[in-house]
Amino acid sequence: MRGIRRIILAGVLAGVVLPPVARGDENRAAARIEAMVNFLAKAPRLGVIADCSYDVLQDSGQKIEFGERRELTLRRPDRARIDVTRRDGARRGLLFDGQQLTAFDLDEKVYATIPKPGTVDAAFAYFAGDLAMRLPLRELFASDLPQELKDALGAARLVGEEKVDGIATDHVAFRGDTADVQLWIPRDGDPLPQRIVITYRLSAGMPQFEADFSGWNLKPEAPDSLFTFNPAAGAEQIPILGAGSGTPPEQKKK
Amino acid sequence: MIRAPRRMMVGVAAVLVAAAVGGGIARGRGGGGGARGGARGGFNRTGAAAGGSFGQGRPARGVERGGFSNRGPAAVGDFAGQQPSGGFGGGGNVGGGQQIDRSEVAQRQRERFGRLGPPDGGAAQRQDRQDNATHRREDWQDYADDHWDEHHDDHPGVAAGVVAGAAVGAAVAAATTPAYWTLSCVPTTVVVGGTTYYQCGSAWYVRVYSGGDVAYFMTNPPAGY
């Protein structure tokens, strides 16, 4: 009879104990994301390559993918450089030297310069917000990332343990008000994301933005000259058309 | 006699365990496909895209041969879907109500430009512009009206009033005026004061950044033209 009791007890205990294990997974997901965002936000320097792709729903209803490689060098608090090479070969970029932002397009041979003394955070927020200029993954490299994601972490969940590019990661997911985010965070070493997928679930066709990260570098070479813009001969300075009232421009192309 | 009840008890315990495990997974599965979807977090791995099939291999009707747009919510790549000031979590100012209804925006713009469009197609204003430089902005607006029909599928948006960056000599003013991703002609180019002007018929354009790409923005003719 004692054996039977033990079995019953084990069964009951299993019923009691298992749900907390599930909750533990949620905690683990939040903890992993928290570790990542704190690590990213506090790094004095960062270098990384992001191979990005994104869907664009065409007027016909067809979804088309585009992509680009973005190389970022960040020297907090006031230096940043992003070099972009699109899959079609177009080369462009963005520089911030603590005083001004410069967007440049090497193929169109144009650039725009905007005075914005201060931090990278403020400059990037102005660039992407007030000027409505494209700056993917800006939030991921902002110092206030932990505050931005604080409320979303409560519902973060662990999808599973997965390998990405040979690296053992925790695949975690959380939801924002308008987008769902998935991250693959290494289980060992620095919690620097290997991959991110953002799904804009309220947009028609639920397009996704994806990025695979490589070459994370916490001590990139970052001399002042790296962030100083020197226009090529013949490059023309042009203005930036902002969003003004905050209404995003309709984004459409024939 | 004891063995039978023990087996029963083992069975009961197994059911209890199964129920506990099943309950934990089922809560998150959302109707997913049984053991196949049994990842730790309860996410379903099955779905239309999971198959990776090309389907029937037949192109959909109206498939485009080129000129695909590369702009849209996912191109922005932010965490909130074209809501720069938005954040995560509840209580933010990001919501479905702020999503862009592109057709509605386009319709609004067509209506607005339609109303502004002069009945004579703007010919009178064009003449005015040549006669009176002080009316240039209005005329320039009229040009926008004139060209709206041929361009309305081709513009990056209506500038709501901000042009940032150094003044570049061009009369790029803060006005509700459309810019275009492409021009409707092979333009004549003129460089005046370091700025390249593009001429299509009677309309003049300069290049501007819009949403991260280079677009053409209607402007007054350069001095001397």
Image: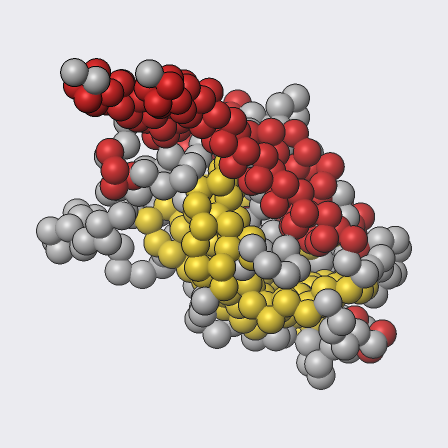
B86 sits to left or right of B9: right
Closest to the observer, B3 or A196: B3
Position above or below: A192 against B116 = below
Residue in the picture at 71% in, 44% down: A145
**Percent coordinates x, y for residue B191 in the rendering:** 67, 73
B37 sits to left or right of A182: left
Position above or below: B18 against A54 = above
Residue A219 in sight in this render: yes
The N terminus of chain B - image quarter: top left
The C terminus of chain B - image quarter: bottom right
Position above or below: A11 against A138 = above
How many marks on residues? 0
B163 sits to left or right of A8: right
Position above or below: A26 against B68 = above
**Percent coordinates x, y for residue A67 in the rendering:** 45, 62
Image colouring: secondary structure
**Percent coordinates x, y for residue A52 in the rendering:** 49, 60
Closest to the observer, A73 or A227: A73
Residue B142 quadrant: top right
Residue in the picture at 71% in, 58% down: A239
A97 sits to left or right of B225: right
Residue B221 in sight in this render: no
**Percent coordinates x, y for residue A12 in the rendering:** 41, 18
Residue in the picture at 57% in, 40% down: A28
Q: Residue at the bottom extreme?
A: A233
Residue A8 quadrant: top left
Residue in the picture at 25% in, 38% down: B35
